[in-house]
Amino acid sequence: MKAPSSSRAAGTRARLLAGAARVFARHGLAGATTRAIARAAGVNEVTLFRHFQTKERLLAAVVGENFGGDPGRDGVPTPPPATADLRADLTRLAAEYDRLLTANLPLVRTMLGEIHHHHREQERQVFRAVFQPVKSALADRIAAAQQAGELRADPGPDLLADLFTGMLFTGVLRCASRDLKLKYDTDDYRRAAVALVLHGAAGKAKGSRK
């Protein structure tokens, strides 16, 4: 008898998390009301409070669900392994960053626009989950390329990875804008970003005296 009840509770919780994510993305953290979230989830407010007690706890749960940081979960990046092809590796990592950011863009915009006012821990969790895994993989791959002489040692791998992901973040925002009429698509943008990194930070071949 307990299994169906547990299953129903899990389903209700999942609907509340999904409804809250939509309402937070649409109305912002301050503008989202528990009544609107309950309506979006198809439950009443009493049910919402029974599961999460407060809107703050619901927000924390939404962040944990979408940006929990468990590699291999849906929406959480598991960066592809490095190969001997630097261009291909950077292209794959750029595509993974693009995919994750695009999938979570409405909620990310809300978090970045408002969360610094009152929600520092959730902000840190969003940054760690959305940006850090791919950025760390990029920095590691760049460091290996620098050691192999494929890229210059300056700028360092962390700075170069930040510059690269900064370009990618801007590209996602531009390509997602309905007001901009662009003459390129996201694939074109990613290829150009990879090319800029490779050409701008190109180093001497290992063992070269020139």
Image: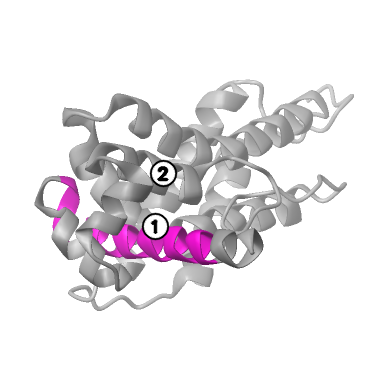
In the rendering, at what x and y percent does residue 210 appear? 78, 25
Mark 1 residue element: helix
Residue 161 visible within the image: yes
Residue sitting nearer the eye, 10 or 136? 10
In the rendering, at what x and y percent does residue 12 appear? 43, 64
Quarter holding residue 46: bottom left
Residue that appears at 30% across and 57% down:
47
Q: Furthest residue to the front?
A: 1
Q: Is residue 15 magenta?
A: yes
| Above or below, 187 relative to 143 | below
Q: Is residue 24 magenta?
A: yes
Residue that appears at 34% across and 44% down:
52
Residue that appears at 23% across and 61% down:
37
Under mark 1, the amino acid is: Leu
Q: Which residue is mark 2?
A: 61
Task: Name the disc covering residue 17, or none.
Answer: 1
Q: Quadrant of the N terminus?
A: bottom right
Task: Name the disc covering residue 55, or none.
Answer: none
In the rendering, at what x and y percent does residue 89 appear? 73, 51
